[in-house]
Image: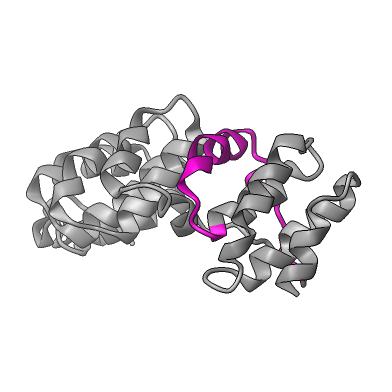
Amino acid sequence: GVKLATDALASKDHKITAVAAQVIEHYGSPKADGAKPALLDALKRADESDEPQIVWALVTLKEPSVMTKAMDLYRKGHLTKVQRLGGGNAFEAKRLAALTSLDEFAKLAGDDSESVRQLVATVLSENAEPKWTPTLVKLVQDKSVEVAREAAVGLGKIGDESARDPLLAQLAKADNDSRAKFLDALRDGIGGEGGNGGDGADGSN
């Protein structure tokens, strides 16, 4: 299957190359690692109809050279629309983040794209460590409540006291949907004080 799909990447028909990339993504690494050169070659000839599928197949095969292209497609909303071979959304944040170190990925916390900042908040929250506290504190104060909510999850796991005030500030202006995440973050560690009623957090749930 991998060989047939790899051979099909040489087609001039973008519908065929798109499906071939989906097949290769389905096999994944390490089974389809040998398809990388053909995917990279097909990417040079790609258009909007097959570029996202080809790039995502390369992301799945952990090809770091497509990081910039992948982030560009993510900003445009194209990467999250890539489908699996059997149907369903193929996008996974952790695969995109795995193309580089978390230290480099964290630098995107100041990106102009809200979707990128939200992705960074999600990934760092999934890999919650004290070293990410300053970045997550920055993100929990983001103008986008979606970004702030994701960052709150990570801060709750880390439980650093320095994040308490930013979380309380967001809690004060949060809508009902967001409020629960900020409350959970406070209760998960940033202080049991915040969840014990001293600031009214307990009584609001």
Residue 2 figure quarter:
bottom right
With respect to residue 103, does 85 lie above or below?
below
**Percent coordinates x, y for residue 112 in the rendering:** 46, 24
In this rendering, the answer to whether 86 lies above or below 47 is below
Residue nearer the viewer, 87 or 43: 43
Q: Is residue 5 above or below residue 162?
A: below
Relative placement, left or right, of 132 versus 171 is left
Relative to residue 137, is residue 36 depicted above or below?
below
Question: Magenta stretch mostly in which secondary structure?
Answer: helix
**Residue 28 at what x, y percent from top left?**
59, 69
Could you say which quadrant of the image residue 169 lies in? top left
Residue 201 visible here: no
Image quadrant occupied by the N terminus: bottom right
Image x and y of residue 134, in percent: 18, 39
Residue depicted at 54% across the width and 60% down the height: 61
Query: Residue shown at 22%/43% (left/top)?
Result: 168
Residue shown at 33% from the left, 62% from the top: 205
Q: Which residues are magenta?
A: 60-85
Quadrant of the image occupied by residue 191: bottom left
**Residue 200 visible, this orientation:** yes
Relative placement, left or right, of 187 versus 149 is: left
Identity of the residue drawn at 58% across and 74% down: 31
Horizontally, is 178 left or right of 182 in the view?
right
| 77 within the magenta span | yes
Question: In the image as oriented, which residue stretches furthest toward the right?
Answer: 13
Residue 64 among those drawn in magenta: yes
The mark total stands at 0
11 and 189: which one is in front?
Answer: 11
Q: Determine the residue located farthest toward the top in the rendered image.
A: 112
